[in-house]
Amino acid sequence: MTDIAMTDRVPTRPNSPEKATASSGSSELASLTAQLESKPLDPEAWYRLIQLAENTGDIDQIRAAYDGLLKYYPNNHTAQIPYINHYLHDTTTFPIAEDLFKRFLRASPSVELWDFYLTYVRRVNAGPQTREVVGKAYEFALDHVGQDKASGSIWRDYIRFLKDAPAQSTWEEQQKMDALRKAYHKAVQIPLDNVDSLWAELESFETGLNKTTAKKFLADLSPAHMQARTVLRQLTTQYSNGLYPSLPSGSPGRPTLFLTGVPDFDDADRKLVGRWKAYLKWEMDNPLEIEEKDKAVLITRLQLIFRKAVIRMRFFPEIWFMAFTWLNGIGKHDEAMTLLKLGMEANPSSALLHFTYAETNELSKKYDVVHKMYEKYLGHLLQELEEMNVNPDSPTTSFSFDDPSKSPTNGQDSNAMDAVNASQPSFLLPAVPETVAKTSEYSDRRSEYGLVWIMYIRFAHRAEGLKASRKVFSNARKIKQTPWEVYEAAALLEYHATDEGRAVASRIFDNGMKNHEKEPKYIERYLNFLIAINDKNNARALFERVIGQFPPDKARVIWERWSKFEYQNGDLEACLKLEKRIAEAYPSETPIKRFAQRHMYLGTDAIATRDLGFSQTKKPNTNKSKTAGTKDVSLVLSSTGPSASNKRAPSPESRKVPEPKRARPNSPPRGGDDRDRSWNSRRKSPPPPPRRDREEEKPPIHIPAVITSFIGQLPSASSFDGPVFRTDDLMNLLRNAVIPASSRRSPPPPPSAAHPPRPVRGPPVADYGRPPPAEYNRPAPDYGRPPPDYGRPPMEPGYYGGPPRRRY
């Protein structure tokens, strides 16, 4: 910010007013301050802290409270304005206010704060000799927020300021008219709240100067002005759709704060972020149709919009990512990286922003920056894990993996637990908390922690080679919270990296057994690796060593993996011995199940289809005669009801000719004699029977034979496992599609309240452009985890077979 509007006074410390708070208020203030140090993102606590600080009247406590608030909610004008206002009551404290203006203004997109600044500038520069200072302050403000919809009041005040300028000569008068025309022409092309009144003022201004030139100027500006009016209407609808909710009511004489809390990503949060994404994409499509020669105006407008978006949606990393992507795409790389750093400070747990920062610096060969970022990010995630593990008030509690009897699945049905496990992420560790929900949350956080280690190892290997990646893995091994996925990722990296990778990878897997021998998924992955490299002896030794350590409900994945290997590579006697051991572990399973699984390949199960009749559920019976295959469905429907034996079958005539529509009792007949006779007969007929009797007397539904045959050939709905398209998503996409045109056109309408954008579903998954439909959030069937691609052909036939069919 320039010093054009600042005074030359030396900053002085304000005199503190007398403290007028009771001891209870002071203790509450201290308690809230301590609470906010540990939990700084609590809006209600900040509301109370600011209120208590204001009540004390102590400027030092007020300053400390506002500085603490703005540390976690920067660029919040609802806090900045009352903060500065405390130093505007006395001219001796104006230098402090000016320092705060310098600190806040440049990064602020708030029209309210800039208007507050202009009020101060006019106050301290009231003389005619300081008009140039005030004029530069107006230009400075309009360069920053002049494209905002709410900046119409600043444009109006600026134009009035220009009109009041004295003109002592013809040249000065001409300069004044040119400045007014320039300001008007800019303002009427922006979708301001008062754009219509500014257009009316421009017409009067131009007509008063010269009617001939007025027609030319107004004709040239009219298309852009009409476009701005159209966009204004759409913006008004968009803003009323929840983008900028009204401020909460505050106490009389106290500031009204607007603070956003950390989102829960419930339906309301997903709808809100969906509306913001749709709005930002609409603005990026240039609805004002600003021409290429004025591209700088469009960039300035979008910069302002994105700055407002990341303030309102401070704790939604997706909005920060959109802003970074746009800035980086237009070549503003330094500004994009600065914004990305601010987003990481606001969202220290965001994987999206940290991974983006790492890749961007990796492309720039700034490897030291990436190392520091990963170390800081891993430290933050580890701290979260430790707090969850030791804090009794945390949603999760600490637990041990050493006692299988404490498992929440112990003694429960394995199929039920399979359904629970299928709904969990791929990085899931078995845990033993008090509830399944607590287990899932801690496991998710620990798996995410392991994922960051894996990304760090990959980066080190890409950027600096195998030695650097081994060093990173060595650091990961020293931390007890490191999950087993890190060991597997490091082993596979070694396997592909060198010719001796097989031996190194085996040692890494074996070393991981020291910490993760109680985790069936890790055992399964280790078995997969040994089988894939054809190390049968070690695979058999591993199976025999660990199979007795797990209860049956946890050991199933290991039994299944080893039995599949024996069925494909072992002799019959070994298979029968293994099946006997499986039968002892799972006595409720029928013998035919194992027998059939021993005779399957790539999902082909001849026993199920030929001997147990499972094929009949997929295709119609084609062995019957054509007449039987085209049997009238109406007869089938009529014979399946509870009273079918007591009812008479309808005659062919009743199926061919539908009964005429019953007329209202008091409506006159229409048509000829036949209709008259029908009307008279109906009027003389007794009253209709009760509704139930009438429904039973309705003729059965008749479906043509060709449709019946076609329906019989269709597969059942349960057999479809492909993507499900939602018609409302497709219609919204077509409705909001932008069709480019060479001529000036109306901008595409933004999403309205009647057709809001579909919210993002579920934190963890998305296509980053459109939220996945609800059908994709259902747990996938448990197909079993395929073996890792070790860069060599599979060592056994059918290893990548289809999902197991549990028919037995």
Image (tube, rainbow, N blue to C red):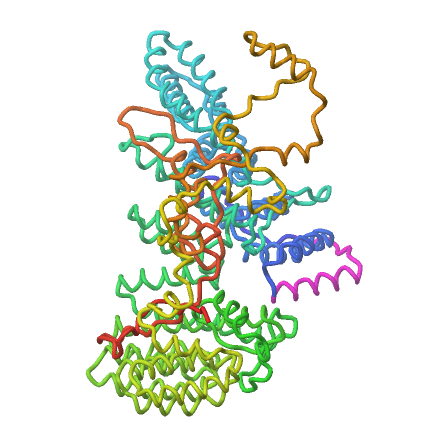
The location of residue 407, given as percent across then percent down, is: 57, 79
Whether 154 is among the magenta residues is no
Would you place residue 21 above or below residue 477 in this image? Answer: above
Q: Quadrant of the N terminus?
A: top left
**Residue 209, picture quadrant:** top left
Q: What range of the chain is rendered magenta? A: 15-38
In this rendering, the answer to whether 102 lies above or below 547 is: above
- 780 sits left or right of 286 in the view: right
| Residue pictured at 32% horizontal, 24% vertical | 744
Give whichever of 657, 123 is nearer the camera.
657
Front residue of 123 and 686 = 686
Observer-nearest of 655 and 137: 655
| 643 in relation to 352, above or below | above
Question: Mainly helix, strand or loop, the magenta region?
Answer: helix
Q: Residue at x 69, y 54 (%)?
A: 48
- Can you give x and y, in whole percent of width and height, for residue 309 in the image? 47, 45
